């Protein structure tokens, strides 16, 4: 039997001599391997970044949980419910939750009088996370921040429509607005996607609302942004269990944009299917190229095979030699693909500002190399078997 090092050396030499014939195969397998590694590794980060900005896709990663005061499940009438601190903290730490925002709606309506005109509107107390979580942008001015919430500042943000009804225009940042017999500084107006239902709302810090406007204000609704659309259903299912375990849960409602979520996931599934089918087709073409190239090599080296058998080479030696050449071709191409994938992943990571841990790359590169071994063995077995079964006399006489 031939030594392993000699087998590898001879196989690599034959592959190198036929490099022009195998160029298309090498490129095909290298690109397929690189594409497979990049898609598998970076798919997670691409999806995570896409989930950060899904306003145009229906804001499908946002869940709203609230207590319905008119729920028939609460036979004690309209007894108020709110999310207690232990419940909020448990939800905030739950797997799949990226951001959590607390809010409370004032019972009834708020009233503001400006230049002898009285306007009524819905008043909501929110925290500083509310804006980013919902993907809102200020149409004018700015939103109140964490410091103003912590200091119970008398500041507010107005919906565009209520700002126009009160002041006659929407550029009202810096104005002073009386709300329920108290004065508030308007920091800005609400804009951005998803604000259509909130154009008649006014927003104040939740801390300010609970202290100055009405002492019984408590956070009766929670907004949760999940890390990805795959986390929406598990998180939505977990909310009632968590609330029920820590406090009364009568009247609890959990809402998500299920229709949009279904559409987004369907689109993502088809895109991923198309990508994986394209990669699989590339690799299969590479495997066919190995098979075709090895069959041609066997045909061209018929006399060489006959001479080797004449001097004592066994069928198993010939089989192993040609199989080793197929494996060297497949593995060599896969190694080039891994190198290309490493470069692409580094560039994409810089763009996404999300570095990939080295162990993850090594894990998937190892899987790609293992797959290339299977591909090379599968594609090279038939030509190698054909070479090993040649008759000595016929092979020597072959022209």
Image: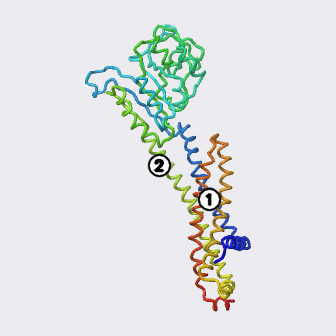
**Whether residue 118 can be seen here:** no
* Circle nearer the N terminus (2, 1): 1
- Foreground of the two, 259 or 131: 131
Name the side, left or right, on which 288 lies relative to 8. left
Q: Tell me the quadrant of the picture where the N terminus can be found.
A: bottom right
- For image coordinates 50% across by 29% down, the residue present is 195
Residue 344 position (above or below residue 330):
above
Residue 210: which quarter of the image? top left
Observer-side mark, 2 or 1, equals 1
Residue at label 1? Answer: 33
Q: Position of residue 74 (x, y in %)?
A: 28, 25
Q: How many marks?
A: 2
- Badge 1 crowding class, 10 Å Cα cut-off, few under 14, some 14 to 19, many 20 or more, is many
Name the side, left or right, on which 217 lies relative to 11. left
Residue 48 position (above or below residue 311):
above
Residue 315: which quarter of the image? bottom right
- Badge 2 crowding class, 10 Å Cα cut-off, few under 14, some 14 to 19, many 20 or more, is few
- For image coordinates 52% across by 20% down, the residue present is 158
- For image coordinates 36% across by 31% down, the residue present is 253
- Foreground of the two, 117 or 214: 214
Q: Tag on residue 266? A: 2
Residue furthest to the left in view is 75
Q: Position of residue 316 (x, y in %)?
A: 59, 79
In terms of secondary structure, where does tag 2 sit?
helix
**Whether residue 49 can be seen here:** yes
Residue 162 position (above or below residue 262):
above
């Amino acid at each position: 039997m031939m030594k392993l090092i000699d087998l590898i050396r001879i196989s690599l030499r034959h592959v190198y001599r036929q490099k022009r014939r195998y160029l298309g195969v090498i490129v095909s397998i290298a690109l397929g391997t690189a594409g497979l590694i990049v898609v598998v590794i970076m798919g997670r980060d691409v999806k995570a970044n896409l989930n950060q900005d899904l306003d145009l896709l229906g804001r499908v990663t946002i869940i709203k949980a609230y207590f319905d005061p008119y729920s028939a499940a609460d036979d004690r009438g309209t007894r108020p419910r709110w999310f207690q601190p232990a419940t909020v903290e448990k939800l905030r730490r739950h797997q799949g939750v990226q951001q959590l925002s607390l809010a409370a709606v004032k019972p009834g309506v708020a009233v503001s009088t400006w230049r002898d005109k009285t306007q009524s509107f819905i008043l909501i107390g929110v925290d500083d996370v509310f804006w980013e979580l919902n993907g809102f942008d200020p149409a004018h001015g700015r939103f109140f921040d964490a410091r103003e919430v912590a200091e119970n500042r008398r500041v507010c943000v107005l919906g565009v429509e209520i700002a126009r009804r009160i002041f006659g225009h929407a550029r009202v940042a810096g104005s002073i607005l009386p709300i329920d017999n108290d004065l508030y500084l308007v920091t800005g107006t609400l804009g951005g996607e998803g604000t259509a239902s909130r154009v008649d709302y006014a927003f104040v810090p939740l801390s300010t609302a609970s202290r100055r406007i009405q002492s019984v204000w408590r956070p009766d609704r929670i907004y949760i942004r999940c890390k990805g659309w795959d986390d929406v259903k598990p998180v939505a299912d977990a909310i009632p269990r968590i609330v029920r375990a820590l406090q009364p849960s009568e009247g609890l409602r959990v809402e998500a944009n299920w229709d949009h979520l279904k559409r987004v996931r369907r689109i993502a599934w088809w895109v991923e299917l198309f990508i994986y089918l394209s990669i699989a087709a590339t690799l299969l073409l590479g495997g066919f190229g190995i098979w075709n190239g090895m069959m041609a090599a066997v045909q061209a080296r018929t006399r060489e095979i006959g001479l080797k058998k004449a001097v004592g080479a066994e069928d198993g030696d010939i089989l192993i030699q040609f199989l080793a050449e197929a494996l060297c071709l497949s593995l060599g191409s896969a190694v080039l693909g891994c190198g290309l994938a490493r470069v692409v992943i580094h560039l994409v990571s810089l763009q996404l500002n999300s570095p990939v841990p080295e162990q993850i790359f090594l894990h998937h590169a190892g899987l790609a190399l293992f797959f290339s071994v299977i591909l090379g063995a599968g594609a090279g077995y038939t030509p190698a078997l054909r070479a090993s079964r040649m008759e000595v006399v016929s092979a020597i006489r072959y022209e």
